[in-house]
Image (cartoon, helix red, strand yellow):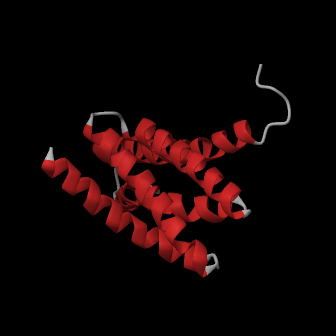
């Protein structure tokens, strides 16, 4: 249990750094940077916790992105700022860079060969689909709380 808490604390610390970095790239005002860090750390730590309990990475990413969406709406209400100011920087640490990288590397290796390799083809398809589904989970998970919160008509 202590190891899991240390892993989550480590994950929160090292995922808040790119969230703040990208917030600075997107010209977020200095007073809002801690909130971007908090949202990024919370989202990535929740995803890590859900992965620890053997939830697939796509669903874990979806739940974490939805939590980031809810959290950033509350920050936006408190500070009278747009929620995307916090949210875009906060979901950057959850982008599936490793899967996208492995897809591109396998595609390059596949194109360099004279014959089609079934192993490389399977790797391209597997990593490519995982990348697409994780990106879809990020976008839908982040958009859903805003769609429900800023709705003018009742849901039912």
User: Number of marks in the image?
Assistant: 0
Outermost front residue: 78
> In this rendering, does residue 41 appear at all?
yes
Q: Position of residue 108 (x, y in %)?
A: 40, 62
At a point 41% along the width and 59% down the height, the residue shown is 41
Q: Position of residue 156 (x, y in %)?
A: 77, 19
Quadrant for residue 152, please give it: top right
Outermost top residue: 156
Outermost right residue: 152
At a point 14% along the width and 51% down the height, the residue shown is 3
* 134 relative to 87 in the view: left or right: left
Quadrant for residue 10, please give it: bottom left
At a point 46% along the width and 62% down the height, the residue shown is 38
Q: Position of residue 75 (x, y in %)?
A: 62, 58
Residue closer to the observer: 156 or 99: 156
Placement of 110 over or under 36, stated as above or below:
above
* 144 relative to 124 in the view: left or right: right
Placement of 94 over or under 155, stated as above or below:
below
Quadrant for residue 82, please give it: bottom right
Q: Point out the image quarter for the N terminus.
A: top left
> In this rendering, does residue 116 appear at all?
no
* 85 relative to 47 in the view: left or right: right
At a point 72% along the width and 40% down the height, the residue shown is 149
Q: Position of residue 116 (x, y in %)?
A: 36, 47
């Amino acid at each position: 249990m202590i190891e899991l808490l240390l892993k989550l604390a480590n994950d929160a610390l090292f995922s808040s750094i790119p969230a703040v970095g990208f917030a600075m790239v997107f010209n977020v005002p200095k007073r809002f940077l801690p909130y971007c860090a908090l949202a990024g750390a919370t989202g990535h730590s929740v995803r890590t916790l859900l992965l620890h309990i053997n939830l697939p990475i796509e669903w874990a990413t979806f739940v974490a992105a939805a939590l980031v969406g809810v959290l950033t709406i509350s920050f936006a209400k408190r500070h009278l700022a747009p929620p995307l100011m916090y949210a875009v920087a906060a979901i950057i640490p959850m982008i599936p860079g490793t899967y996208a990288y492995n897809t591109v590397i396998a595609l390059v290796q596949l194109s360099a060969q004279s014959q089609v390799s079934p192993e490389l083809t399977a790797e391209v398809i597997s990593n490519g689909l995982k990348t697409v589904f994780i990106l879809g989970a990020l976008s839908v998970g982040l958009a859903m709380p805003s769609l429900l919160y800023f709705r003018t008509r009742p849901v039912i």
